[in-house]
Amino acid sequence: MKKKVNIVKKLRKISHNRIDDPAPNILFKYCKGANDLQYNLGKGLGVYVKSSKGDKESSPPTHDKQMISSIYHSFLKKEKDAEIILPKKERYHRMDISSYNHYLENYFSPDDFDIDENFLENEIYHFSVNESDLKNYVTETLYDSFPKTKYHLISVSMIYKDPYVSMLVEEGCDWKDFMTNLCYARDELSAKQKTTFLNDLKNNPTKHFMRWSDKEGAKKNLATKVTFAKFNWKKMVGINPYEEYEEYIKCFELFSTRHSSDKHDIEWVERPQELLKRWVWIPSYFNFYI
């Protein structure tokens, strides 16, 4: 019991002293989940997930073992001198996505990119997009949704261990638009119930986002999703994802997405986005301006 209390105290102390940026925050969420899963802490530090197809009765929330295990093997380590799991060495960057796009269009060539010149192996690179710049790059548009929902990049964390790149990506869309889509998609609700829900969403949003798994995102009107991807860079380096998508997806060893939702995250089945390769080049942007 004493060991568990000490681990919780250490995690809380470390959490208070960490840089308050989206990328390291997301990683540390799963770091706390890994400790909870390993040491059965039971202090609200766990990461829980529910199926996107099930309701509360048929698909109760469970520990997100698959996501935690994937992130643990790539980004985390067990400290030798202490029974605690922590991130590997971290590097922190704030990113202007508009400036990065300008760099790719005017100064960058994929043929000139050497991953060994831009990454130190087994070290974590965090890139958090400036809050004022969040909506300047759309990562995905859900055309079938109403209102039309657009996701944009919030942060990317990467680690390279030859030949694999592991990536933790956070994206977000307009939370009220997301909730509106969710309402319209619920066929079990009557027209009157949907009208009541939408009026309540407009007049009293606090009631809803306090139950959201990502409360801080909801308070900023962001419905977030987190993706873990692990792929073989040596196989991917010469592939154009937009022209050779079938070959592109063969490079992936793992790919999982979690959507923030009511109370707990939802496991969602998605296809690997073509633009994931685009984020591997980010360190070259910072090195270019040094």
Image (spheres, grey):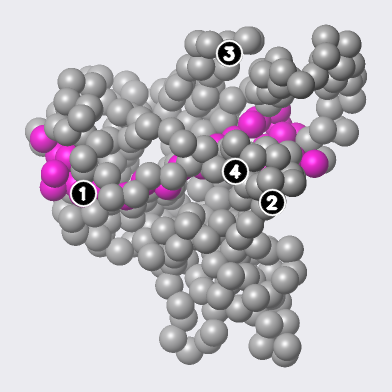
Closer to the N terminus: mark 4 or mark 1?
4
Tag 4's secondary structure?
strand
Q: Which mark is residue 118?
A: none
Residue at left offset 63%, top offset 10%: 146
Q: What residue would you read off at disc 4?
A: 51
Q: Measure the C-alpha gap from mark 2 to mark 1.
A: 34 Å
Residues at discs 3 and 4 in contact (Cβ within 8 Å): no
**Residue 148 lies in quadrant:** top right
Q: Is residue 224 above or below residue 243?
A: below
Closer to the N terminus: mark 2 or mark 1?
2
Q: What residue would you read off at disc 2?
A: 60
Closer to the N terminus: mark 3 or mark 2?
2
Q: Which of marks 1 and 3 is in front?
A: 3
Magenta-highlighted residues? 211-238
Residue at left offset 45%, top offset 63%: 69
Q: Nearer the viewer, mark 2 or mark 1?
A: 2
Local crowd size for mark 3, using a 10 Å CA cut-off: few (<14), some (14–19), many (≥20): some
Percent across and percent down for residue 264 are 68, 46
Closer to the N terminus: mark 2 or mark 4?
4
Q: Measure the C-alpha gap from mark 2 to mark 4.
A: 8 Å
Q: Which of marks 4 and 1 is in front?
A: 4
Q: Which amino acid does label 3 sit on?
A: Ser
Q: What residue would you read off at disc 3?
A: 145
